[in-house]
Image (cartoon, grey):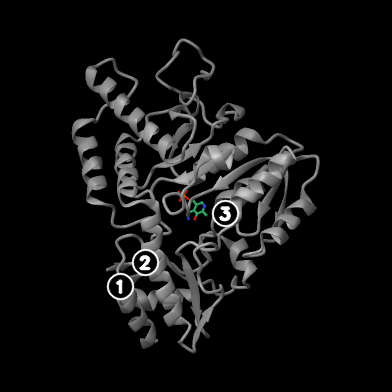
Amino acid sequence: MIYLDNAATTFPKPIEVVNAVANAIKKYGVNPGRSSCELSIKTAGLVYECRKAVADFFEAKGPESVVFTLNCTLAINMVLKGLLKPGDHVVISCFEHNAVVRPLKKLCNSHISFSKVEIYPKNKEKTLLEFSKVVNEKTKLLVCLHASNVWGIRLPIEEIVDFAHKKGIQVLVDAAQTAGVIKINLKKSKIDFLCVSGHKNLYGPCGVGLLISDNIEKLDTILEGGTGTNSIFLDQPNEIPEKFESGTLNVPGILGLKKGIEFVNNLSTENMFKHKFELILYLYNNLSQISYIELYTDKPNFEHHVPILSFNVKNKKSEEVAFFLNSENICVRAGLHCAPLAHAFFKTLDKGAVRISPSIFTTKDNIDFLLNAIKKL
Ligand code: PMP
């Protein structure tokens, strides 16, 4: 099978990651920070090393800025529900994923409101102007994805953070599609809350995500329980990051993620980006020669896009195309990609789009195979 749905989760995982997960189950099948046996202490040490690797990778203050979650969705929910109070107002971009929109919709029942802002691809000034039109004295948080999971369009995060901070507003960046693809420096960018999938471009296994923040103490918890510390107290302890990690950790996932980060570091984020970008550019150039293909975005460019491309075949629903490609042994994602707002932007809510997202393991031959299959349509 040719797998071109890496924006959902990367597959295959590097062999180092597979081995680390298997090794964790075989050798470290204990509960870190719970039992007093040597193996439990050693396992807790390995988890700490991953925390440190994450902090280094994103240039956060230190390991205590890193909270392990199940996925990016949970990290986003932790910020929205742990920060916002009745009366607060939130601003989001018009590309946000349902991981942002659905929790916010629910929070509307608790007297929290939100406004959506139009994005002008490639035009930072116009985009910022849109943000400035909707912020008000109640705006506490601005939520913005780093790049659209449907259109690959990048948002001017640094400028958005600058703008928000000048108004005293905090920023949540959804880096599900960019962590491991674009360098993110927490200190320099001053992002308040960075939410990340561990299982996409960091090449960790499914079931691992990250909430990274140098100001995590600003959040309340949305989940309380055992932390392995201060068990005498019935209240949730205040020690960070344990405060936010109630329940047994996903040790195989975390140790797998550490190897994933090493894999990205060894090849370098820049090289990963370049490899995938060249494939997407090649695909775009070829698709644009086919009369029955509908492309929505401009020709991908390094500064304004990440390597994700969505298109349609004239007079066909995206699901039909994906079904046909599946019969040709090619796996893509059709439909709305959990991002109806992003589809509304290019008026594709009725038929969705066919999304192609390569990984470091995708080759030019794979893209040629896809192009040949599309030509059979
Ligand atoms: N935000 C964006 C932009 C995404 O693409 C995704 C995954 N499709 C998510 C959030 C949710 O990520 P996860 O599956 O890790 O919860």
Identity of the residue drawn at 43% across and 29% down: 63
Q: Given this view, does label 1 or label 2 mark the residue nearer the observer?
A: 1
The residue nearer to you, when weighing 126 against 297, is 126
Q: Is residue 292 left or right of residue 268?
A: right
Query: Which element carries disc 1, helix, strand or loop?
Result: helix
- Residue type at mark 1 is Asn
In space, the residues marked 1 and 2 are separated at their CA atoms by 9 Å
Query: Which element carries disc 2, helix, strand or loop?
Result: loop
State whether residue 5 appears in this view.
Answer: no
Which image quadrant: the C terminus? Answer: bottom left
Residue density around tag 1, few if under 14, some if 14–19, many if 20 or more, within 10 Å: some
Residue density around tag 3, few if under 14, some if 14–19, many if 20 or more, within 10 Å: some
- Residue type at mark 2 is Leu
Identity of the residue drawn at 35% across and 56% down: 10
- Residue type at mark 3 is Asn
Q: Which residue is mark 2?
A: 4
| Residue 366's disc number | 1
Residue 236 placement (x, y as % from top left): 52, 20
Q: Which residue is mark 3?
A: 98
Q: Is residue 232 above or below residue 174?
A: above
Extreme-bottom residue of the structure: 291
In space, the residues marked 2 and 3 are separated at their CA atoms by 22 Å
